[in-house]
Image (cartoon, helix red, strand yellow):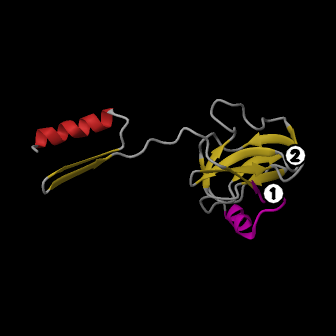
Amino acid sequence: MDREQIKQLIADLEASKLQKIIIKRGDFELHLEKQAPAPVAPAPVRTVIAENATESAFQAELSQKGERGGGRKPEAEGKYVTSPMVGTFYPSPAPDQPPFVKVGDMVEEGTIVCIIEAMKVMNEVKAGVAGKIAEILIDNAQPVEFGSKLLRIV
């Protein structure tokens, strides 16, 4: 099998729905494989209750130091819904659906306010406190770290 035939096989594989081609001719063996496309079906959903009532000691220390070691910024009043894990923030259950909450919405402790995707698992985040959504601090599909402030509830 020459180089041009192999190039043609690669092009054919990319254009097809096949994921893998294996060709064996005598002692010659060729394996071609492409990465699977991202899944279209929604990932499994797991519920996580975020830490809301108080900041952890780690987060309190970080907020006192400020982002770049400068002075501490005054915080707006209210309770914050924080990220329970590292992942990606999504305000709605699917791209074509409305967000779980909007600024001005009233929520209860168990109200789902967003999803954090971590390792292809969608984790529901609940408000943790009752009140009114005053501010949504993270944009759609933005990466977040553990303890990142997601929403402010008054």
**Is 82 one of the magenta-colored residues?**
no
**Is 57 one of the magenta-colored residues?**
yes
Counting from the top left corner in percent of width and height, residue 137 is at: 70, 44
Task: Give the residue drawn at x 82%, y 41%.
Answer: 133
Q: Is residue 111 left or right of residue 66?
A: right
Determine which residue is flagged by label 1. Answer: 52
Of 110 and 82, nearer the camera is 110
Determine the residue located farthest toward the left in the rendered image. Answer: 2
Determine which residue is flagged by label 2. Answer: 154
Task: Give the residue drawn at x 62%, y 33%.
Answer: 95
Q: What residue type is labelled 1?
A: Asn
Q: In the picture shown, does residue 96 fall above or below 23?
A: above
Residue 74 in sight here: no
Mark 2 neighbour class, 10 Å CA radius: few under 14, some 14 to 19, many 20 or more:
some
Counting from the top left corner in percent of width and height, residue 45 is at: 68, 49
Of 132 and 17, nearer the camera is 17
Q: In this view, does 12 lie to the left or right of 115?
A: left
Image quadrant in which you'd find residue 98: top right
Of 148 and 115, nearer the camera is 115
Determine the residue located farthest toward the bottom in the rendered image. Answer: 57
Foreground mark, 2 or 1?
A: 1
Please report the bounds of the magenta region as a residue range: 48-65
Counting from the top left corner in percent of width and height, residue 47 is at: 74, 53
Q: In this view, does 140 lie to the left or right of 17?
A: right
> How many discs appear?
2
Helix, strand or loop status at disc 1: loop
Label 2 or label 1, whichever comes before in sequence order: 1
How far is the residue under mark 2 from the one under mark 1?
12 Å
Task: Give the residue drawn at x 84%, y 59%.
Answer: 53
Counting from the top left corner in percent of width and height, residue 33 is at: 32, 48
Q: Which amino acid does label 2 sit on?
A: Val
